[in-house]
Image (cartoon, rainbow, N blue to C red):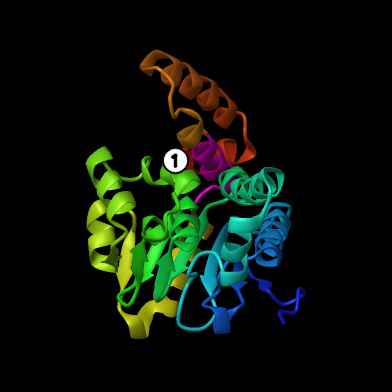
């Protein structure tokens, strides 16, 4: 049995909050307890003003293999209301990642499949070890990777999304990088060091500017060009009024 208190590990080192999916014997498969723990950890990181970046990783050999067997077994027997509640729990997680004020990085070793692939690509940035494998195998069991389609379609072309979703094949970290699902691929033996170094780059930029940029980037989805420009103008004004901007401009002018 899983210990509900240790399904997700959370720690802060300096400006970096690390969230670890901690079901290595189950390939960090998603279950209600893990999803709840992950949401709680994200909320805690979001409330900590010292945190500049969040890194989500998986214990053991894999990032996340998707829903666990018990969850899949319940799909066939659950009522409409139960299935709806289950789907909404995962939907809330994907939305929360975008609502967190600072960048959320998925650090992927091993497999990120089905809902686990959705979780990785729902993050703002994806860093992968060369061992990483990505895929949406749901169609092989007659299931639809429904919610993650909204995420995937915003990351790759329509043709690539169709192929990934309907063939259910796994792809390598290098191919995922070529398609736009992954930002960087690092060597296995340097992965932890590279991820830490990448995450700490956010210490050198304005927290408020990054937060405003993240919000703007996702809010302009679906807007017309003129509406997107208008929203950008509003954010521009807000940014000018922040302490980070005032101090940054003052430092620049003194050079």
Q: Nearer the viewer, residue 192 or 30?
A: 30
- Image location (x, y in percent) of residue 67: 54, 64
Residue range (magenta): 205-215
Of residue 106 and residue 51, the one placed in the foreground of this image is 106
Image x and y of residue 184, in percent: 32, 63
Horizontal arrangement in the rendering, residue 77 relative to residue 228 (left or right):
right
Q: Name the residue under label 1.
A: 150
Is any part of residue 220 visible from this angle? yes
Outermost residue, front direction?
77
Measuring 58% from the left and 50% from the top, which residue is drawn there? 102
Quadrant where the C terminus sits is top left
Say if 46 sits above or below 67 in the image.
above
> Visible in this render: residue 16?
no
Q: Image quadrant for the N terminus?
A: bottom right
Q: Position of residue 88 (x, y in %)?
A: 65, 45
Q: Which of 247 and 132 is in front in this view?
A: 132
Q: What element carries label 1?
A: helix
Q: Is residue 108 left or right of residue 179?
A: right
Residue beneath the point at 46% across and 61% down: 201
Location of residue 136 by image quarter: bottom left
Crowding around mark 1 (Cα neighbors within 10 Å: few <14, some 14 to 19, many 20+) is: few
Q: Residue at x 48, y 72 (%)?
A: 63
């Amino acid at each position: 049995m899983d210990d509900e208190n240790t399904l997700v590990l959370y720690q802060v080192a300096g400006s970096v909050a690390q969230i670890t999916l901690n079901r290595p014997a189950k390939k960090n498969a998603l279950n209600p307890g893990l999803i709840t723990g992950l949401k709680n950890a994200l909320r805690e990181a979001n409330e900590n003003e010292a945190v500049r970046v969040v890194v989500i990783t998986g214990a053991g050999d894999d990032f996340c293999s998707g829903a666990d067997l018990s969850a899949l077994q319940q799909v066939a027997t659950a009522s409409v209301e139960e299935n709806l509640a289950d789907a909404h729990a995962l939907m809330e997680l994907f939305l929360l990642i975008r609502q967190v004020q600072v960048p959320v990085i998925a650090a992927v070793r091993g497999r990120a499949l089905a809902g686990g692939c959705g979780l990785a690509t729902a993050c703002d940035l994806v860093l992968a070890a060369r061992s990483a494998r990505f895929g949406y195998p749901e169609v092989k069991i007659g299931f639809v990777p429904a919610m993650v389609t909204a995420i995937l379609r915003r990351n790759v072309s329509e043709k690539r999304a169709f192929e990934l979703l309907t063939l259910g094949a796994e792809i390598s970290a290098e191919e995922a990088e070529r398609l736009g699902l992954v930002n960087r691929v690092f060597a296995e033996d340097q992965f932890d060091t590279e991820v830490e170094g990448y995450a700490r780059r956010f210490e050198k930029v304005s927290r408020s500017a990054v937060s405003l940029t993240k919000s703007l980037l996702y809010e302009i989805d679906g807007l017309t060009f003129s509406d997107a420009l208008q929203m950008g103008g509003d954010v521009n004004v807000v940014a000018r009024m922040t302490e980070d901007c005032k101090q940054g401009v003052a430092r620049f002018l003194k050079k």
